Image (cartoon, rainbow, N blue to C red):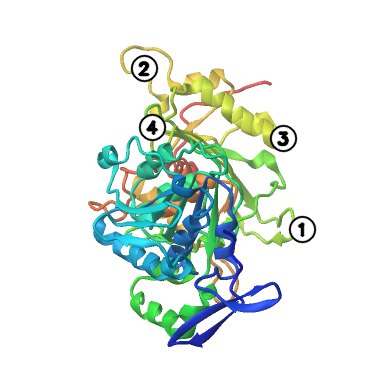
Amino acid sequence: MTWNAVSEFREEAGGLVPYVWVNGTLRPVGWAPLPGSQVAFLAAVETIVLFQGARAACGKSEALVADFLQDVGVLGAEHKGLLIRRTYPELEDIKSVAAKIIPRVFPSATYNETTSTWTFGDGATLKFRPFLDASEWDRFHGRNVTWVGIDELATYKTLEPMQMLLSILRSSHPLARPRMRCATNTWGAGRDAILEYFKLTPARAPTIGPLITGGGGPSRRVITGSLLENWPLLKTQPDYIETLRAATKDNAAKAQAWIDGLWAAPPNMFFGDVDWNAVTVPNFEPPNPGRIRIGYDHGLSAPSAAVFCYESRGEDIEFPDGSRKATLRGDVFVVDEYVAQSKPGVGPKPTMYPADIAGKLHSVIERRGWNQRLLIAPGNIADTAIFSPGQNDNRASVADDFERAKIVFEPADKSRVLGAAEVLKRLTATRPPEDGIRESPGLFICEGCAHLLGSLPNLQRDERDPDDVDTAQNDHEYDALRYWLRRDRVPPLRTRRWHM
């Protein structure tokens, strides 16, 4: 089945009826996608597609059901769909959406309330099932389906259930195109995992995101809908946006997610008031790469992370499109990053040792065409733990291992509260005041630093010390960054001289 986009709605029989162009004639239909993100979602060919956006943005749940319907009448009984939410009560919303759409498009389809299953004339089936977490996997293991839909993906704290369900997508039918489709509001417990897996940032995304490959999964893409695309809702409830504003008036972060469709930070997030659109800048080549220095946080079972920082002396920054940005002396730009991990919060497997990581840091320098000397120049800062000898003997420290690999670090100031305050002060300084003139140096992050832009906005406050970041989360790049921003607070442990 192919869908023609809605051309207009007409009030008929007490409701809005969509009309589409068919062979040059406007005709009423049971359902049709709205122009924009719904059309893009239904046309996507990647194995995994995530439809994200504001609350009630462009009918994400409707599009989820409609995507399954595209292969009804094509694969016969081989077309088996599974539509998932965490619990049975949560399934009621998406079941109601399906009950409105399916009879209009396939009048002969029948629904079995006992088994929560739609059956179509050609034998295709769509089942609604709860899937709370990985402990319930035995109920799904061994199934074969051609289509999996997950509604409100962000309600899952991790993407483990989603990744498990990928294993049951299979079919021998020559016309089958096994796929997974997900929909979500830009708010929920799974925010950090979604940003990581789909390579998103908290800033506004384009309607059709780029193709994503690698990173522990099949081809995937993100489609972003806007609340303003939802013509029927805004026609029948013209004050809906104001209703959302009233519902979120005491929670700016939720308003940003529900109305603007941005992956805003919930109120317990340490950097929840930061304007990430102001912080994020296009990738650029620093005017003087010799001033780049590194902040580094070392781990074995935990990730190792490095940020490459450039400090302005007041010169303008030129971006690839020819636009320029005026800077203040002391503005810091994170221009690149490196993270060694197998998944967020977990170190790489197999384990990477200092010599391995040093090779990766040298590779970043080589890729960017910078001088390798910056790795031995004063001002590269790392966790003080790397300067301690082996715990059980007097073997060389991690810092010594890095030195042999021609990377020299100085010890960090590890004051957590002062470091958190420094990062927050710098991030909030990026927002231009009402008169348009910034007075304090800010911290800007290039859009290519996906790990940092994905993890930093999601860091929560420590419940025991609200002035600090909770350490029980993926804070390794944050640590590397705060070490570097506080680099002038501790004198070098020792001085080394290198000749290359």
Q: Are marks 4 and 3 in contact (CB under 8 Å)?
A: no
Other-residue count near label 3 (Cα within 10 Å), few / some / many at <14 / 14–19 / ≥20? few
Distance from the alpha carbon under mark 1 to that under mark 2: 50 Å
Is 290 drawn above or below residue 223 in the view shown? above
Residue 312: x and y, percent?
A: 64, 51
**In whole angstroms, how far apart are the C-alphas of marks 1 and 3?**
20 Å
Asked whether residue 430 is in view, the answer is no
Q: Distance between the Cα atoms at labels 4 and 2?
A: 18 Å
Q: Are marks 2 and 3 in contact (CB under 8 Å)?
A: no
| Residue situated in front as seen by the camera: 487 or 156 | 156
Q: What mark, if any, has residue 302 been given in the picture?
A: 4
Measure how far apart labels 4 and 3 are at the Cα level: 29 Å
Q: On the image, numbered disc 1 is attached to which residue? A: 322
Mark 4 / mark 1, whichever is N-terminal: 4
Of pointers 1 and 2, the one earlier in the residue sequence: 1
Left or right: where does residue 132 sit relative to residue 354? left
Residue drawn at x 49%, y 79% is 232
Q: Which kind of residue does numbered mark 1 sit on?
A: Gly
At 69% from the left and 47% from the top, the residue drawn is: 286
Which label is found at residue 390? 2
Name the element at disc 2.
loop
Q: Which part of the image, by quadrant, shows the N terminus? A: bottom right
Q: Residues within 10 Å of mark 4 (few under 14, many from 20)?
A: many
Using a 10 Å C-alpha cutoff, classify the residue at mark 1 as few (fewer than 14 neighbours), some (14 to 19) or many (20 or more): few
Mark 3 sits on what residue? 369
Indicate which disc, 4 or 3, sits on the residue closer to the N terminus. Answer: 4
Does residue 244 sit above or below 49 in this rendering?
below
- The earlier-in-sequence mark between 2 and 3 is 3
Give the amino acid at mark 4. Answer: Ala
Tell me the quarter of the picture where residue 393 sits. top left
Q: Residue at x 50, y 71 (%)?
A: 31
